[in-house]
Amino acid sequence: MRIDIGPQPSVALDCRNNLGESVIWDEQTQQLWWVNIHEGQIWSWAPFLSEQPRVFQLDEKVGAVALRKRGGIAAALQSGFAVFDPATGGVEVIADIERNLSTTRLNDGRVDLAGRFVCGGMDEGNPQRAISAVYTLDEGGNVRRLIEGIACANSICWSPDGTTLYFTDMPTRRIDAFDYDLTSSAVSNRRPFADLSTEPGFADGSVVDAEGYLWNAQWGGSKVVRYSPKGFVDREIRLPVANPTCLTFGGSDLDILFVTSAWFGLDETARANQASAGSLFALKPGVRGRLENRFAG
């Protein structure tokens, strides 16, 4: 399958996801993994091979996925952490999360340099309440609360040395930075990193490139933004859809930026005007990314 990738975003896969999210690149198999949250689907696709994407159907919403050192996929489900075996379709639950909260689910996550799967939740109730949290799952299956009082967790990623954690609680319209202890996963010194209060969109998924700059997909903003390590806007790239959701660097040289999107939340007029909403986009921004960390469990 041939896809033409240039410096401006183009549709790499017309997948029409309701809520595409949590896209990651597996350098060992040269394929992308991502989720279609509300449909309970995990997608995989090798964009440079002549094959169609695979879609794995789960029994509940799936907010985020991560690569595993042992093979397979770690998954953040509505009910908690699990591991998924693509060969069999089997799902093994590791830990229940927030079973006492009927309106919350796990949402956004990535793996730290120590191999922990760090994932935050969100409240899907109306009105939305700050009743969820950010959790770490370690190699032994132990869960630890990291940040309390969360309405909708997103933008989880780290500086290249792993000692700065980036995170947003979306309704705050701000990306924060924390000092991050790789030994214990403890966070401290919370401070504002990027202020979106005057922007049209909200901070959604993020990834950090090889130069230490943070790329953020901005829900409702029709763009991805590159921020310097000091939090200054370095570059903005427009997309033809309102709701880009998450992004990762892939390809053999890690020089292709892949961006998921959603048609969730769009009215009929907006959907008619955004024919590529829910598609997977790709571009070559002129910088390289970093390999995804793998969950040690």
Image (cartoon, rainbow, N blue to C red):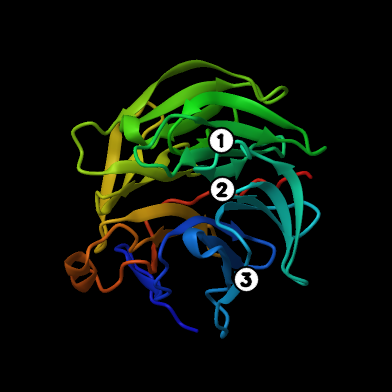
Q: What secondary structure is marked by label 1?
A: loop
Q: Earlier in the sequence, mark 2 or mark 3?
A: 3
**C-alpha span from label 2 to label 3:** 26 Å
Q: Position of residue 77 (x, y in %)?
A: 61, 51
Q: Which residue shows up at 29% across the image and 39% down it?
A: 234
Q: Position of residue 152 (x, y in %)?
A: 43, 38
- Where is 254 relative to 235, above or below? below
Q: Nearer the viewer, residue 44 or 231?
A: 44
Q: Earlier in the sequence, mark 2 or mark 1?
A: 1
Residue 202's image quarter? Answer: top left
Q: Position of residue 254 (x, y in %)?
A: 53, 57
Q: Is residue 100 left or right of residue 130?
A: right
Q: Nearer the viewer, mark 2 or mark 3?
A: 3
**C-alpha span from label 2 to label 1:** 8 Å
| Residue at the spot of label 2 | 290
Q: Nearer the viewer, residue 77 or 193?
A: 77
- Where is 46 relative to 161, above or below? below
Q: Position of residue 295 (x, y in %)?
A: 72, 46
Under mark 3, the amino acid is Phe
Label annotation for residue 56: 3
Q: Is residue 136 left or right of residue 126?
A: right
Q: Is residue 6 left or right of residue 257?
A: left
Q: Which residue shows up at 17% across the image and 68% down it?
A: 269
Q: What secondary structure is marked by label 2?
A: loop
Kindly indicate whether the residue at mark 1 contacts the one at mark 3 (C-beta within 8 angstroms): no
Kindly indicate whether the residue at mark 1 contacts the one at mark 2 (C-beta within 8 angstroms): yes
- Where is 21 relative to 190, above or below? below
| Residue at the spot of label 1 | 160
Under mark 2, the amino acid is Arg
Dot 3, crowdedness within 10 Å: few (<14), some or many (≥20)? some
